[in-house]
């Protein structure tokens, strides 16, 4: 529930559909990563993996900025249709549990 202040960490989940925006410089992208219960805005400058797509699994490493945007230094995408990074699978599982808990209230 709390990001480590001033330390790098990883987030994982799915790239939220409709959230991908490219900046004018051609290298900076903004997108949202979701675990289906919550999502976080991500900013990344660099070349994205070939398999990076909306609606697909992703793991990003970086730091949370003071504005609440996750400043990614590395972005990893799943490598085929049958694989999801363990971090992404765990995040989706936890998101589904949180969503069920919130619906049960």
Image: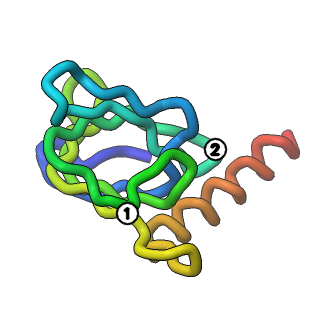
Tell me the residue at 52%/52% (across/down).
Answer: 14
Crowding near the residue tagged with mark 2, few <14, some 14–19, many ≥20 C-alpha atoms within 10 Å: some
Tell me the residue at 48%/31% (across/down).
Answer: 19
Would you name the residue on which mark 2 appears? 37
Marks 1 and 2, the one that precedes in the sequence: 2
x, y (%) of residue 98? 68, 51
In the rendered image, the residue lying farthest to the right is: 104
x, y (%) of residue 5? 19, 43
Taking the image as shown, residue 19 lies to the left or right of residue 76, namely right
Taking the image as shown, residue 27 lies to the left or right of residue 97, namely left
- In the image, is residue 8 above or below residue 87? above
In the rendered image, the residue lying farthest to the bottom is: 82
Tell me the residue at 49%/60% (across/down).
Answer: 57
Would you name the residue on which mark 1 appears? 77
State the residue in front, 4 or 40: 40
Q: Give the label, 1 or 2, closer to the camera.
A: 1
Classify residue 97 by image quadrant: bottom right
Q: CA distance from mark 1 to mark 2?
A: 20 Å
In the picture, the quarter occupied by the C terminus is: top right
Taking the image as shown, residue 69 lies to the left or right of residue 103, namely left
Taking the image as shown, residue 41 lies to the left or right of residue 102, namely left
**Is label 2 in a helix, a strand or a loop?**
loop
């Amino acid at each position: 529930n709390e990001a480590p202040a001033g330390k790098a960490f990883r987030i994982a989940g799915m790239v939220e559909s409709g959230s991908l925006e490219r900046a004018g410089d051609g290298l900076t992208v903004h997108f949202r990563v979701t675990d289906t219960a919550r999502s976080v805005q991500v900013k990344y400058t660099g070349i994205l993996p070939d398999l990076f797509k909306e609606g697909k699994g992703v793991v990003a490493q970086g730091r949370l900025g003071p504005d609440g945007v996750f400043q990614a230094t590395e972005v990893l995408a799943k490598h085929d249709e049958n694989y999801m990074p363990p971090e992404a699978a765990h995040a989706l599982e936890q998101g589904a549990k949180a969503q069920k808990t919130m619906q049960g209230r």
